[in-house]
Image (tube, rainbow, N blue to C red):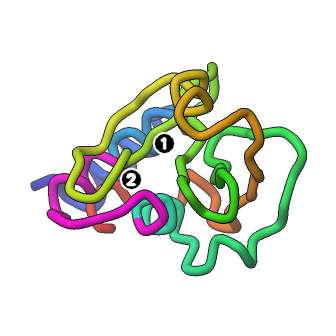
Amino acid sequence: MRTKAESILSLVESSDKEILIQRGKMIGEHTSVMNCQLFAATLTKSSNIKSLKEIKKPAVGSVLRWGTGSHYAVYLGDGEVIQVPEWHSPVEVVSLDSVTKDFGDEYTVYQPTTPIKELSVDTP
């Protein structure tokens, strides 16, 4: 286990995308049962995704919601998202295109309030 100072240094040196991937994998390792909405909320520290501000274009860390909540993922940039595809599934990084093939081209984009650099990679 890393010290708090090592964790902080790691966050400073990491890109936002790397922070989200590290945190997502850590959440997946420590949680055996999770769906896509709970994963996105836990990853971004957003207790109520639907109360977040809607934005037009996804940015790194944005939560994407398809339909009325049929699927959720977090945008990583460069056309990639991090998600839990279904209950009991491992966390995965996939292309946004592959998710839109499964759930459709229309999705709502939400901007979480917690800055990515403030997300811990040691605790969910």
Quadrant location of the N terminus in the rendered image? bottom left
- Main SS of the magenta part reads helix
Left or right, residue 92 beside residue 1: right
Residue 8: mark: 2
SS type, badge 2: helix
Whether the residues at callouts 1 and 2 have beta carbons within 8 Å, the answer is yes
Residue 47 in percent (x, y) is at: 55, 79
Amino acid of disc 2: Ile
Identify which residue, 8 or 63, lies in the foreground: 63
Looking at the picture, which amino acid does disc 1 mark?
Val
User: Which residue is denoted by mark 1 in the rendering?
Assistant: 12
Q: Quadrant of residue 31?
A: bottom left
Q: Is 97 on the left-hand or right-hand side of 18?
A: right
Q: Nearer the viewer, residue 64 or 43?
A: 64
Give the residues in magenta: 23-38
Q: Which image quarter holds the C terminus?
A: bottom left
Report helix, strand or loop for mark 1. helix
Residue at the image point whose x is 57% and y is 72% from the top = 46
Q: Position of residue 50 (x, y in %)?
A: 71, 73
